[in-house]
Amino acid sequence: MSSINICRDNTDPFYRYKMPAIISKIEGRGNGIKTAVVNNSDVARALARPPMYVTKFFGLELGAQTSCNEATDRYMVNGSHDSSKLQDLLDVFIQKFVLCKACKNPETDIVVTKDQMLFRDCKACGKRSPIDIAHKLSGVILKNPPTQGGKKTGSSKKASKRERRKNADADDEDGSDEVGSDDEFTKRINAEASALPQASALAAEDDDNWAIDTSEEAVAARVREVESQVNSLVLGDEDEGDDAYSQLGNWILEQDPKPDNIEVFKKIKELGIENKHRTLQVLAQTLFDSDILKQIDGRAPMLKKLMATENHEKAFLGGTERFVGLEHPELVAAVPKILHKYYNLDLVEEDVIVKWGSRASKKYVDKETSKKVRKAAQPFLTWLEEAEEDSDESDDE
Protein backbone atom coordinates (compact mmCIF):
# COMPACT_ATOMS: atom_id res chain seq x y z
CA MET A 1 0.00 0.00 0.00
CA SER A 2 1.49 3.32 -1.05
CA SER A 3 2.18 6.03 1.50
CA ILE A 4 1.86 9.77 0.91
CA ASN A 5 2.61 12.88 2.93
CA ILE A 6 -0.21 13.79 5.31
CA CYS A 7 0.22 17.39 4.21
CA ARG A 8 0.33 16.92 0.44
CA ASP A 9 1.44 20.53 -0.05
CA ASN A 10 4.72 19.41 1.49
CA THR A 11 6.65 17.63 -1.27
CA ASP A 12 9.67 16.74 0.88
CA PRO A 13 10.30 13.01 0.28
CA PHE A 14 11.65 12.71 3.85
CA TYR A 15 8.58 14.33 5.44
CA ARG A 16 8.06 12.10 8.46
CA TYR A 17 4.26 12.24 8.66
CA LYS A 18 2.82 9.67 6.26
CA MET A 19 -0.56 8.13 5.62
CA PRO A 20 -1.95 5.52 3.23
CA ALA A 21 -3.51 6.83 0.04
CA ILE A 22 -7.31 6.50 0.05
CA ILE A 23 -8.63 3.28 -1.51
CA SER A 24 -12.30 3.25 -2.51
CA LYS A 25 -14.49 0.52 -3.96
CA ILE A 26 -17.80 1.07 -5.76
CA GLU A 27 -20.49 -1.38 -4.67
CA GLY A 28 -24.03 -1.93 -5.95
CA ARG A 29 -25.76 -0.23 -8.86
CA GLY A 30 -28.54 2.18 -9.66
CA ASN A 31 -30.11 3.92 -6.70
CA GLY A 32 -28.35 1.52 -4.34
CA ILE A 33 -24.82 2.35 -5.44
CA LYS A 34 -22.41 3.01 -2.59
CA THR A 35 -18.69 3.67 -2.10
CA ALA A 36 -16.71 1.67 0.47
CA VAL A 37 -13.65 3.44 1.88
CA VAL A 38 -11.61 0.26 2.10
CA ASN A 39 -8.72 1.55 4.22
CA ASN A 40 -10.57 4.21 6.18
CA SER A 41 -9.34 2.86 9.53
CA ASP A 42 -5.69 2.92 8.43
CA VAL A 43 -6.01 6.48 7.15
CA ALA A 44 -7.76 7.65 10.33
CA ARG A 45 -5.13 5.94 12.48
CA ALA A 46 -2.35 7.81 10.66
CA LEU A 47 -4.19 11.06 11.36
CA ALA A 48 -4.92 10.10 15.01
CA ARG A 49 -8.63 10.68 14.47
CA PRO A 50 -11.59 8.30 14.91
CA PRO A 51 -12.51 6.64 11.58
CA MET A 52 -16.08 7.91 11.93
CA TYR A 53 -14.90 11.55 11.72
CA VAL A 54 -13.36 10.94 8.31
CA THR A 55 -16.38 9.11 6.91
CA LYS A 56 -18.86 11.64 8.28
CA PHE A 57 -16.79 14.47 6.80
CA PHE A 58 -16.97 12.82 3.37
CA GLY A 59 -20.74 12.50 3.68
CA LEU A 60 -21.24 16.09 4.81
CA GLU A 61 -19.09 17.49 2.02
CA LEU A 62 -20.72 15.30 -0.64
CA GLY A 63 -24.26 15.68 0.67
CA ALA A 64 -24.51 11.91 1.00
CA GLN A 65 -25.59 9.53 3.74
CA THR A 66 -22.91 7.46 5.43
CA SER A 67 -22.71 4.31 7.52
CA CYS A 68 -19.95 3.42 9.98
CA ASN A 69 -19.49 -0.02 11.50
CA GLU A 70 -16.34 -0.26 13.59
CA ALA A 71 -17.00 -3.89 14.49
CA THR A 72 -16.80 -4.99 10.84
CA ASP A 73 -14.49 -2.16 9.77
CA ARG A 74 -16.97 -1.05 7.10
CA TYR A 75 -17.25 2.63 6.24
CA MET A 76 -19.66 3.51 3.43
CA VAL A 77 -20.66 6.69 1.59
CA ASN A 78 -23.79 6.67 -0.59
CA GLY A 79 -23.15 7.31 -4.28
CA SER A 80 -20.22 6.68 -6.59
CA HIS A 81 -17.03 8.48 -5.58
CA ASP A 82 -13.56 7.67 -6.93
CA SER A 83 -10.44 7.62 -4.78
CA SER A 84 -9.03 10.87 -6.16
CA LYS A 85 -12.17 12.81 -5.20
CA LEU A 86 -12.10 11.38 -1.67
CA GLN A 87 -8.37 12.10 -1.41
CA ASP A 88 -9.00 15.75 -2.28
CA LEU A 89 -11.73 15.93 0.36
CA LEU A 90 -9.39 14.32 2.87
CA ASP A 91 -6.94 17.18 2.26
CA VAL A 92 -9.69 19.59 3.33
CA PHE A 93 -10.40 17.50 6.44
CA ILE A 94 -6.71 17.53 7.33
CA GLN A 95 -6.51 21.31 6.93
CA LYS A 96 -9.61 21.93 9.05
CA PHE A 97 -9.36 19.24 11.72
CA VAL A 98 -5.77 17.93 11.87
CA LEU A 99 -2.97 20.35 10.97
CA CYS A 100 -1.83 22.93 13.50
CA LYS A 101 -2.69 26.35 12.14
CA ALA A 102 0.61 27.77 13.45
CA CYS A 103 3.26 25.23 12.43
CA LYS A 104 1.30 22.95 10.04
CA ASN A 105 2.30 19.90 12.08
CA PRO A 106 -0.29 17.07 12.10
CA GLU A 107 0.66 15.87 15.59
CA THR A 108 -2.40 17.40 17.26
CA ASP A 109 -5.17 16.39 19.65
CA ILE A 110 -8.75 17.57 19.40
CA VAL A 111 -9.66 19.29 22.67
CA VAL A 112 -13.26 19.90 23.72
CA THR A 113 -13.56 22.76 26.23
CA LYS A 114 -16.19 23.14 28.94
CA ASP A 115 -17.99 25.77 26.88
CA GLN A 116 -18.23 23.33 23.95
CA MET A 117 -15.53 24.89 21.81
CA LEU A 118 -13.10 22.78 19.74
CA PHE A 119 -9.35 23.24 19.39
CA ARG A 120 -6.40 21.43 17.82
CA ASP A 121 -3.77 21.15 20.55
CA CYS A 122 -0.34 20.90 18.89
CA LYS A 123 2.28 18.72 20.59
CA ALA A 124 5.04 20.17 18.42
CA CYS A 125 4.76 23.93 19.01
CA GLY A 126 2.28 24.05 21.90
CA LYS A 127 -0.20 26.29 20.07
CA ARG A 128 -3.97 25.77 20.12
CA SER A 129 -5.74 26.27 16.81
CA PRO A 130 -9.52 26.83 16.87
CA ILE A 131 -11.76 24.49 14.88
CA ASP A 132 -14.66 26.04 12.99
CA ILE A 133 -17.58 25.32 15.31
CA ALA A 134 -20.01 26.18 12.50
CA HIS A 135 -18.91 23.19 10.40
CA LYS A 136 -21.41 20.37 10.68
CA LEU A 137 -18.66 17.90 11.59
CA SER A 138 -17.97 19.97 14.70
CA GLY A 139 -21.45 19.02 15.91
CA VAL A 140 -20.62 15.37 15.28
CA ILE A 141 -17.39 15.71 17.27
CA LEU A 142 -19.16 17.40 20.19
CA LYS A 143 -21.64 14.51 20.34
CA ASN A 144 -18.86 11.93 19.88
CA PRO A 145 -15.73 13.42 21.54
CA PRO A 146 -12.38 11.75 20.82
CA THR A 147 -11.29 9.00 23.17
CA GLN A 148 -8.03 7.11 23.64
CA GLY A 149 -8.56 5.43 20.27
CA GLY A 150 -8.72 8.70 18.36
CA LYS A 151 -6.57 11.01 20.41
CA LYS A 152 -2.84 11.10 20.99
CA THR A 153 -2.59 11.50 24.75
CA GLY A 154 0.76 11.10 26.41
CA SER A 155 0.06 7.47 27.29
CA SER A 156 -1.28 6.59 23.83
CA LYS A 157 1.76 8.15 22.21
CA LYS A 158 3.97 5.90 24.30
CA ALA A 159 1.78 2.92 23.38
CA SER A 160 2.14 3.71 19.68
CA LYS A 161 5.91 3.86 20.07
CA ARG A 162 5.91 0.49 21.82
CA GLU A 163 3.78 -0.91 19.00
CA ARG A 164 6.27 0.36 16.40
CA ARG A 165 9.12 -1.20 18.38
CA LYS A 166 7.21 -4.47 18.62
CA ASN A 167 6.67 -4.46 14.87
CA ALA A 168 10.34 -3.67 14.30
CA ASP A 169 11.39 -6.57 16.53
CA ALA A 170 9.01 -8.85 14.62
CA ASP A 171 10.61 -7.76 11.36
CA ASP A 172 14.04 -8.60 12.79
CA GLU A 173 12.84 -12.08 13.75
CA ASP A 174 11.58 -12.59 10.22
CA GLY A 175 15.03 -11.73 8.89
CA SER A 176 13.84 -8.54 7.24
CA ASP A 177 16.07 -5.46 7.20
CA GLU A 178 13.25 -3.14 6.18
CA VAL A 179 11.21 -1.12 8.66
CA GLY A 180 8.41 0.94 7.16
CA SER A 181 9.02 -0.27 3.61
CA ASP A 182 6.56 2.24 2.18
CA ASP A 183 8.55 5.31 3.19
CA GLU A 184 10.53 7.28 0.67
CA PHE A 185 13.85 6.57 2.38
CA THR A 186 13.41 2.82 1.91
CA LYS A 187 12.38 3.29 -1.70
CA ARG A 188 15.55 5.24 -2.40
CA ILE A 189 17.67 2.60 -0.69
CA ASN A 190 16.06 -0.17 -2.73
CA ALA A 191 16.47 1.82 -5.93
CA GLU A 192 20.19 2.22 -5.28
CA ALA A 193 20.79 -1.23 -3.81
CA SER A 194 22.06 -2.61 -7.10
CA ALA A 195 24.85 -0.05 -7.06
CA LEU A 196 26.09 -1.14 -3.63
CA PRO A 197 28.93 -3.40 -4.84
CA GLN A 198 30.28 -0.60 -7.02
CA ALA A 199 29.87 1.86 -4.18
CA SER A 200 31.73 -0.50 -1.87
CA ALA A 201 34.55 -0.78 -4.35
CA LEU A 202 34.77 2.99 -4.68
CA ALA A 203 34.72 3.34 -0.91
CA ALA A 204 37.59 0.89 -0.67
CA GLU A 205 39.54 2.93 -3.19
CA ASP A 206 38.78 6.09 -1.24
CA ASP A 207 40.10 4.47 1.94
CA ASP A 208 43.42 3.98 0.18
CA ASN A 209 43.46 7.52 -1.22
CA TRP A 210 42.24 9.82 1.53
CA ALA A 211 43.72 12.95 0.04
CA ILE A 212 44.85 14.22 -3.29
CA ASP A 213 48.41 13.89 -2.04
CA THR A 214 48.81 10.10 -1.78
CA SER A 215 52.35 10.05 -0.48
CA GLU A 216 53.00 7.95 2.61
CA GLU A 217 53.60 11.07 4.70
CA ALA A 218 50.33 12.71 3.62
CA VAL A 219 48.29 9.55 4.16
CA ALA A 220 49.84 9.00 7.60
CA ALA A 221 49.09 12.60 8.57
CA ARG A 222 45.51 12.21 7.44
CA VAL A 223 45.13 9.00 9.44
CA ARG A 224 46.42 10.71 12.58
CA GLU A 225 44.04 13.64 12.09
CA VAL A 226 40.98 11.48 11.65
CA GLU A 227 41.91 9.15 14.50
CA SER A 228 42.31 12.13 16.79
CA GLN A 229 38.72 13.15 15.94
CA VAL A 230 37.26 9.76 16.78
CA ASN A 231 39.44 8.89 19.74
CA SER A 232 36.42 9.42 21.97
CA LEU A 233 34.34 6.68 20.36
CA VAL A 234 33.35 4.19 23.06
CA LEU A 235 32.43 0.93 21.46
CA GLY A 236 30.73 -0.74 24.41
CA ASP A 237 31.36 -4.23 25.70
CA GLU A 238 30.80 -6.32 22.58
CA ASP A 239 33.96 -7.96 21.33
CA GLU A 240 33.21 -8.42 17.67
CA GLY A 241 33.30 -5.83 14.96
CA ASP A 242 35.11 -3.02 16.83
CA ASP A 243 37.04 -2.13 13.69
CA ALA A 244 33.79 -1.71 11.75
CA TYR A 245 32.60 1.03 14.14
CA SER A 246 35.92 2.83 13.87
CA GLN A 247 35.75 2.57 10.10
CA LEU A 248 32.26 4.07 10.11
CA GLY A 249 33.26 6.93 12.40
CA ASN A 250 36.42 7.69 10.44
CA TRP A 251 34.58 7.51 7.13
CA ILE A 252 31.91 10.00 8.20
CA LEU A 253 34.33 12.47 9.79
CA GLU A 254 36.88 12.51 6.98
CA GLN A 255 34.32 13.66 4.39
CA ASP A 256 33.44 17.29 3.76
CA PRO A 257 30.56 17.83 3.40
CA LYS A 258 29.31 14.91 5.45
CA PRO A 259 27.67 12.07 3.50
CA ASP A 260 23.90 12.09 3.06
CA ASN A 261 21.54 9.56 4.64
CA ILE A 262 21.58 7.13 1.73
CA GLU A 263 25.38 7.05 1.63
CA VAL A 264 25.64 6.55 5.38
CA PHE A 265 23.06 3.77 5.37
CA LYS A 266 24.79 1.96 2.52
CA LYS A 267 28.12 2.22 4.34
CA ILE A 268 26.56 0.76 7.50
CA LYS A 269 25.11 -2.12 5.46
CA GLU A 270 28.46 -2.67 3.79
CA LEU A 271 30.12 -2.97 7.21
CA GLY A 272 27.40 -5.36 8.40
CA ILE A 273 26.48 -3.36 11.51
CA GLU A 274 22.97 -2.17 10.61
CA ASN A 275 21.43 -4.13 13.51
CA LYS A 276 24.03 -3.24 16.16
CA HIS A 277 23.13 -0.71 18.82
CA ARG A 278 26.67 0.69 18.96
CA THR A 279 26.17 1.95 15.41
CA LEU A 280 23.76 4.54 16.85
CA GLN A 281 26.39 5.68 19.34
CA VAL A 282 28.87 6.31 16.55
CA LEU A 283 26.26 8.17 14.50
CA ALA A 284 25.34 10.42 17.43
CA GLN A 285 28.99 11.44 17.72
CA THR A 286 29.81 11.92 14.06
CA LEU A 287 26.73 12.97 12.07
CA PHE A 288 26.26 16.36 13.69
CA ASP A 289 28.22 19.53 14.41
CA SER A 290 27.47 22.70 16.37
CA ASP A 291 24.26 23.16 14.30
CA ILE A 292 22.82 19.87 15.58
CA LEU A 293 19.40 21.38 16.30
CA LYS A 294 19.00 22.20 12.61
CA GLN A 295 20.39 18.85 11.47
CA ILE A 296 18.41 16.32 13.55
CA ASP A 297 15.26 16.54 11.41
CA GLY A 298 17.17 15.75 8.22
CA ARG A 299 18.83 12.69 9.78
CA ALA A 300 15.68 11.38 11.49
CA PRO A 301 14.44 9.07 8.65
CA MET A 302 17.68 7.09 8.63
CA LEU A 303 18.05 7.07 12.43
CA LYS A 304 14.50 5.80 12.88
CA LYS A 305 15.20 3.00 10.43
CA LEU A 306 18.14 1.87 12.56
CA MET A 307 16.59 2.51 16.01
CA ALA A 308 14.91 -0.84 16.58
CA THR A 309 15.29 -1.55 20.32
CA GLU A 310 15.77 0.16 23.67
CA ASN A 311 19.49 -0.63 23.54
CA HIS A 312 19.74 1.34 20.30
CA GLU A 313 18.07 4.33 21.96
CA LYS A 314 20.33 4.12 25.03
CA ALA A 315 23.42 3.97 22.83
CA PHE A 316 22.19 6.98 20.85
CA LEU A 317 21.77 8.96 24.08
CA GLY A 318 25.21 7.82 25.19
CA GLY A 319 26.77 9.02 21.96
CA THR A 320 24.93 12.33 22.32
CA GLU A 321 26.25 12.64 25.86
CA ARG A 322 29.82 12.30 24.61
CA PHE A 323 29.19 14.58 21.64
CA VAL A 324 27.84 17.37 23.85
CA GLY A 325 29.81 16.79 27.05
CA LEU A 326 33.26 16.24 25.56
CA GLU A 327 33.38 17.42 21.96
CA HIS A 328 30.98 20.40 22.02
CA PRO A 329 30.65 21.64 25.63
CA GLU A 330 29.19 24.88 24.29
CA LEU A 331 26.06 22.83 23.46
CA VAL A 332 25.43 21.65 27.03
CA ALA A 333 22.86 24.41 27.52
CA ALA A 334 21.01 23.15 24.42
CA VAL A 335 20.55 19.60 25.81
CA PRO A 336 16.82 20.15 26.65
CA LYS A 337 16.14 21.26 23.07
CA ILE A 338 18.11 18.34 21.65
CA LEU A 339 16.20 15.84 23.79
CA HIS A 340 12.93 17.49 22.86
CA LYS A 341 13.81 17.04 19.18
CA TYR A 342 14.62 13.36 19.77
CA TYR A 343 11.31 12.90 21.59
CA ASN A 344 9.13 14.73 19.06
CA LEU A 345 10.71 12.83 16.17
CA ASP A 346 10.08 9.49 17.94
CA LEU A 347 13.78 8.68 17.98
CA VAL A 348 13.92 7.97 21.72
CA GLU A 349 11.05 6.91 23.97
CA GLU A 350 10.03 8.84 27.05
CA ASP A 351 10.83 5.94 29.39
CA VAL A 352 14.36 5.68 28.04
CA ILE A 353 14.99 9.41 28.42
CA VAL A 354 13.63 9.45 31.98
CA LYS A 355 15.73 6.45 32.97
CA TRP A 356 18.82 8.03 31.39
CA GLY A 357 18.24 11.27 33.28
CA SER A 358 17.64 9.61 36.65
CA ARG A 359 21.33 9.16 37.54
CA ALA A 360 24.79 9.96 36.29
CA SER A 361 26.85 7.20 34.67
CA LYS A 362 30.50 6.65 33.82
CA LYS A 363 29.72 4.41 30.85
CA TYR A 364 30.21 7.09 28.17
CA VAL A 365 31.87 10.04 29.92
CA ASP A 366 33.47 10.83 33.25
CA LYS A 367 31.12 11.21 36.23
CA GLU A 368 31.39 15.00 36.45
CA THR A 369 30.58 15.49 32.77
CA SER A 370 27.68 13.07 33.09
CA LYS A 371 26.28 15.08 36.02
CA LYS A 372 26.68 18.33 34.10
CA VAL A 373 24.81 17.02 31.04
CA ARG A 374 21.96 15.58 33.11
CA LYS A 375 21.66 18.75 35.16
CA ALA A 376 21.28 20.70 31.91
CA ALA A 377 18.58 18.22 30.82
CA GLN A 378 16.42 18.82 33.91
CA PRO A 379 14.00 21.34 32.31
CA PHE A 380 13.02 18.79 29.67
CA LEU A 381 12.83 15.93 32.20
CA THR A 382 10.53 18.08 34.36
CA TRP A 383 8.38 18.85 31.32
CA LEU A 384 8.08 15.13 30.58
CA GLU A 385 7.03 14.43 34.16
CA GLU A 386 4.38 17.18 34.13
CA ALA A 387 3.08 16.05 30.73
CA GLU A 388 2.70 12.50 32.08
CA GLU A 389 0.81 13.79 35.13
CA ASP A 390 -1.53 15.81 32.90
CA SER A 391 -2.09 12.73 30.76
CA ASP A 392 -2.94 10.62 33.83
CA GLU A 393 -5.39 13.26 35.05
CA SER A 394 -7.00 13.38 31.61
CA ASP A 395 -7.34 9.58 31.59
CA ASP A 396 -8.97 9.65 35.04
CA GLU A 397 -11.50 12.23 33.87
Image: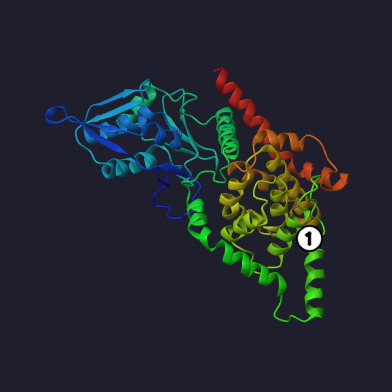
Residue 92: percent from left, percent from top: 33, 42
Q: Residue at 44% of width from left, 25% of height from top?
A: 146
Rendered view: 252 above or below 164: below
Residue 380 horizontal side relative to residue 260, left or right:
right
The part of the image, by quadrant, that contains residue 329 is bottom right
Given residues 204 and 164, the one toward you in this image is 204
Instruction: Classify mark 1: helix, strand or loop.
Output: loop
Residue 331: percent from left, percent from top: 74, 54
Tag count: 1
Given residues 185 and 51, the one toward you in this image is 185
The crowd level at tag 1 (other Cα within 10 Å; few <14, some 14-19, many 20+) is: some
User: Which quarter of the rendered picture does the C terminus lie within?
Assistant: top right
Residue 131: percent from left, percent from top: 40, 35
Residue 214 horizontal side relative to residue 392, left or right:
right
Residue 368 horizontal side relative to residue 213, left or right:
right
Q: Amino acid at mark 1?
A: Val
Residue ID for mark 1: 230
